[in-house]
Image (spheres, grey):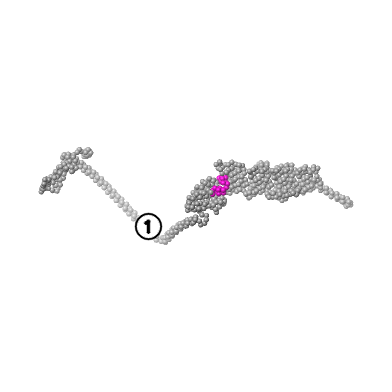
Amino acid sequence: MDLSWLSANPGLSLLALLGAAFAALLLSKWIRYIPNNRVGIVEKLISRKGSVKTGLIALDGEAGYQPQLLRGGWHLLTPFQYRIHKMPLVTIPQGKIGYIFARDGKDLPPSQALASNAHGADFQDVVAFIQGGGEKGPQRQILREGIYAINLVQFVVLTEDRLFYLPLDPGELETFQKMSAIITERAGWRPVIIKGTDDAVGIVTVHDGPSLASGEIIASTVGEDPHQVTTYHNNFQDADKFLVAGGQRGRQYQVLVEGTYYINRLFATVELIPKTVVEVGTVGVVVSYTGAIGADISGQEYRHGELVAKGSRGVWSEPLLPGKYAFNTYAGKVLMVPTTNFILKWSKGEVGSHKFDENLAEVSLITKDAFEPSLPLSVVVHIDYRKAPLVIQRFGDIKKLVEQTLDPMVSAYFKNIGQTRTLIQLIQDRSAIQEQSGTQMKEKFAQYNLELQEVLIGTPTSGAPGGQIEQILVQLRSRQIADEQVETYGRQQSAAVKERELREAEATAKQQTALTESAISIQVQSNQGKAEYAKAQQQAAQIQTLAGAEAEKVRLMGEGEAKRIKVMAEAQAEQAARVGIAQAMAIEEQVRAYGGPQFQLVQQVMNRFAEAIEKSQVDVVPKIHMGGGDKGGGSLIESLLGLLLSEKAGQLAGVATPTAANPEAEALKALLRQNLTK
């Protein structure tokens, strides 16, 4: 373009420059440029519809802040009618959370703490938000990582690094700062991340929604079914669906496990607690503080509390077996019950790792002989895992069971034992007392759903060093030492004997050759003696056999001779008997012939007398005959004859007057006669 004419006419050139400048000024008022990394908030200064009657945003073209934004580029606007506020795009970094505060919308109901986004959820469309029923105030919905073109007059965006908003009132900055401080305190700028290595669970406390009913401390689980789209809140990440599902404010029964959760911390806070770990050798008995009131399944005869099914309020009948559990410890507690054998020590200076016996001490006894020893005890106990809920139901926990029941029961039992024995007996009969107590106390422990495995008794003490009991124990130890010394001396004596035998063996070994030769010689002589002895035995056997044969011969000959003599004697006896009987019969006949036994006697006497005179040659007639007086006289023969002939002779001879014959004699005679005739 040829502008040489301007130089030829200076006045015209000045006017041209001024016109161009004015034109440029007018053009700048009509045309507005918005960078692509920013947005333009339009404030309408002049409108035929007047100003906004309610709210902050002019939805119908009134004068005021307009809902639409100007994005990057050139925009043609009527000069002096609009004011453009260039604001940055809202940027939420990755892994961070942004919170929204709405300046315009419906007022919050008194029961709500946060604005619902069930109907107004698009923060980049102000018209849709307000007309859809969006509520003013802090919103339940949050912003995830990304870049958002948001009208910062309608919405204030709070992030960890900065505050995105168009200032309208200096006083409102304080409100936003307090809100940011609460979010920071609750670690709300980042999602809830629970790592697998943390072994933790998240306990959720909701700060919005209907309150819990009276008597409830934990809100029940709702909206956990993914198939129910309208109510599935995906672990409290969708606050509105949680409330639609019937969720209530307060601490929740549902817990968060490993994972990442984008939760509005103004709506719900999360507390991480350790998982409930049930170690091997234990079970966890659950005492639930929440849930429906369940039916007691422990039976009508059991009056020690209620045992309920899993999920109900009370002591669960099913214990937790060894493992890790995402258990909400605000909704109940888990009492660990050992299922392996554990030892309770009645000893003040000893405490088990389980701490059940930390308040136990030695049992004080009074013995039969008035000593007062302290008896240390150890009791081995086992709890069946299936009966663990019954134990907790009855006693509350194991420590209460030990201190309130087992301690007085065991102490009383051994006090009774101590009264029946002296101190020495108490010491010496320890094994028997252990066995007896183990047997008798098993039944008592079974009444409390416990299994008594063993009772171990220690040494009684007086509680103070140097007491009388210790003196008695010293005396007993002295006796034992003396007994051991006696045993030692005996063994030393045996050792001396063994040593002597060793020396003899060594000496014998040195003379082994001579001993061997002498032993062989002795064996040879012994063998010769055995041979001679065998020969003598053979000779003796031979002689014995010959003697036996000779004796047998003599015996047989003697028996034959004896039999011969016997036969001859019997024959002679029979002959004599026959002769005698014959003579008797002859005599009897003669007696009868002579007229009786008196005559027979006289005859025999005379015969004997004649034989005597003949043999003695005595004079029958004396050579000198002497007589005198009136007494008369006679010779010996005359006197004898007179005597024989008198009746006195018969009486002197014992001959009675003839009587009738005896029938038995007659029968005998008849028998003899019969035999004689044979």
Let me know if residue 485 appears in the view.
yes
Was residue 436 drawn as part of the magenta stretch in this picture?
no
How far from the left and from the top, in percent, is residue 160?
Answer: 71, 50
Quadrant location of the C terminus? top left
Viewer-closest of 671 and 406: 406
Residue beneath label 1, please? 523
Viewer-closest of 327 and 650: 650
Residue at (67%, 43%) from the top-left corner?
210
How far from the left and from the top, in percent, is residue 175?
Answer: 72, 48
Q: Which residues are magenta?
A: 385-407
How far from the left and from the top, in percent, is residue 128?
Answer: 74, 42
How far from the left and from the top, in percent, is residue 304?
Answer: 56, 44
Dominant SS of magenta comes to helix
Let me know if residue 72 appears in the view.
no
Q: Quadrant of residue 127?
A: top right
Left or right, residue 234 beside residue 34? left
Compared to 30, does 504 lie above or below? below
